[in-house]
Image (cartoon, rainbow, N blue to C red):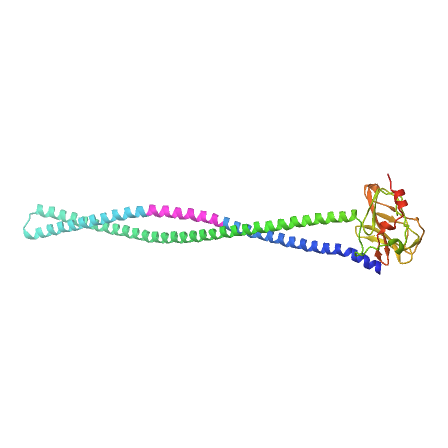
Amino acid sequence: MKNQLLLILILFPFALSASIEGGENLNVLEMKKKLINQNKIIQEMSHEMGNIEVNLGMQNKRYLKLANERAKIEESLMSARKNADLDNQNLKKNYSDTKMILMGVLLNKLEKSEGSSDLLTRKILVENLQRRLIDLDGLMKTNKAYLDDVERIYIRLEDSMKTEKDLLSLMSELEQRKKELRTNIENENSKKTEAQGQFDNVKNKLAMERESFKKNQMKEKLQPVQITEEIKIPSEPLAVVGAGFSTPLSLYQGIDYQKKGVTFNFQGKNEVHAPKAGKVVYTGSLANYGNVLMIDHGNDTRTVLLGQFDYNVKNGDPIQASQIVGYTNPRSQNGLGDGKIYFEVRKNNLAQNTYLLLDKKTLARNISK
């Protein structure tokens, strides 16, 4: 139970880091979704503005065509009305003059007597004048119908002008909507730029934190692992625990030590020895640190081996001093690379200054050249 609690305490920081990293990943995912949504809004606005520009172009062409046609029709109508009015005035004058002449001829007949020749001449003149009046009357009616047609065209022209006004109103509304869309797109682009900057900052920060986390993991692998809380180093560790612990490795490249355990650096495959006689009380693995082997030596004294090695003993096995309990395995370059094993002596479940408890003769003898 104590061993399980010990492993939980060791693994807790890693679980917490994973939880924090997961939260940051979720935050980045939410920011990415926000960016995608903003891009979608900008694309929709841009598409709408494109449609408006196309519609504006079509309506502008239609308006220019109508305005051009209206100008031509208006010019023709003005000319036609002017000519028709002039013709109507001339026809009325001719009709009035012809009627007066006919009246004069008729009145002259009553004033004096005439011969048969005069009567025939007068008859022909009267008939001609009457036909002239009939022709003039017909021309006047035709001209009146022409003027009516001109007026009807003017009414249609007014309808066309209303259509032009409607087109101008529509184009004005489209221009206003286009202006609003342009402003909205600029605002959304500003928001997108800001969100993109935040997203990049968070992403870069997360990447740096991951890199830092990896470096810290590597650093922790390369440094002695502290698996207990800080304690006051006994002033006389030899008297408390007993000296003479042999080094767990027969060959090693060098050592690193602090106030607790000692880390042995090795290369390739080497024998791992028991530092003293005792009994195996725990075997297992610990996260990314490697395998764990714990030996009870009695008198509340235990030793811990942690690192890149494979043990060949099991819980409950009795152990002799310097007995081979496993072999180093750096798990890189087919087992030929560098590796580390952390060694710690514990008294009453408290880490001791292990370096002071090691047999210095074995330290000097076992280091490889």
Observer-nearest of 31 and 315 = 315
**Residue 208 visible in the shown view:** yes
Observer-nearest of 283 and 256 = 256
Give the x, y percent position of residue 270: 88, 43
Q: Residue furthest top?
A: 369
Q: Residue furthest bottom?
A: 1
**Residue 281 visible in the shown view:** no
Residue 16 lies in what quarter of the image?
bottom right
Please state the total of marks drawn on the protein image.
0
Give the x, y percent position of residue 173: 44, 53
Q: Residue furthest front?
A: 235
Quadrant showing the C terminus? top right
Residue at 34%, 47% (x, y): give it: 71
Observer-nearest of 136 and 275 = 275
Residues rendered magenta in the picture: 51-73
**Is 145 on the left-hand or right-hand side of 326?**
left
Residue at 68%, 48% (x, y): give it: 208
**Is 247 on the left-hand or right-hand side of 14?**
right
**Is 77 on the left-hand or right-hand side of 272?**
left
Give the x, y percent position of residue 262: 83, 49
Magenta span main SS: helix
35 in the magenta segment? no
60 in the magenta segment? yes
From the viewer's perspective, is residue 256 above or below residue 298? above
Residue at 57%, 49% (x, y): give it: 193
Give the x, y percent position of residue 157: 34, 51
Quadrant showing the N terminus? bottom right
